[in-house]
Image: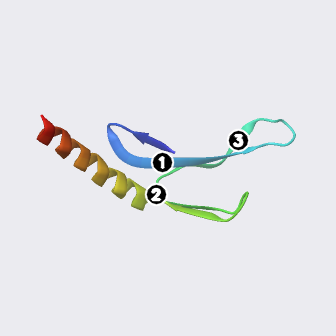
Amino acid sequence: MVPEDDSPTIALAELVLDDRTRQYAYRTHYTTDIFTTDRPWPTTIDLPALTSRREKLMRLAEEQERDDA
């Protein structure tokens, strides 16, 4: 996952190891939507919800820093 300081959006890419070449390749290029995969087990990650939570935590941290100054 790739959160950036100047952008609250969290993006995720899925890479898989090619058995033949032993190189990683994108199975899913970067997405900011709900991500679902079945390898190696079924998993769903709600990136918009994580982004929202991160935005709130960053905002609270900034407010706390201002209050402490």
Q: Disc 2 and disc 3: Cα gap in Å?
A: 21 Å
Q: Secondary structure at mark 1?
A: strand
Q: Quadrant of residue 63?
A: top left
Q: Quadrant of residue 19?
A: top right
Q: Disc 1 and disc 2: Cα gap in Å?
A: 7 Å
The mark nearer the N terminus, 2 or 3, is 3
| Residue placed most toward the observer, 8 or 26 | 8
Report the residue at 23% width, 49% height from top: 60
Q: Is residue 22 above or below residue 59?
A: above
| Residue placed most toward the observer, 61 or 7 | 61
Residue 65: give x, y in percent of width and height: 19, 39
Residue 69: give x, y in percent of width and height: 12, 34
- Name the mark on residue 25: 3
Q: Is residue 45 above or below residue 1?
A: below
- Mark 1 Cα shell of 10 Å, populated few (<14), some (14-19), many (≥20): some
Q: Is residue 60 left or right of residue 20?
A: left
Q: Secondary structure at mark 2?
A: helix
Q: Is residue 43 left or right of residue 59?
A: right
- Mark 3 Cα shell of 10 Å, populated few (<14), some (14-19), many (≥20): few
Q: Amino acid at mark 1?
A: Ala
Which residue is label 2 attached to? Answer: 47
**Camera-nearest label, 2 or 3:** 2
Residue 40: give x, y in percent of width and height: 73, 57
Q: Amino acid at mark 3?
A: Ala
The mark nearer the N terminus, 1 or 2, is 1
Q: Secondary structure at mark 3?
A: strand
Q: Are marks 1 and 2 in contact (CB under 8 Å)?
A: yes
Report the residue at 14% width, 38% height from top: 68
Q: Is residue 66 above or below residue 51?
A: above
The mark nearer the N terminus, 3 or 1, is 1
- Mark 2 Cα shell of 10 Å, populated few (<14), some (14-19), many (≥20): some
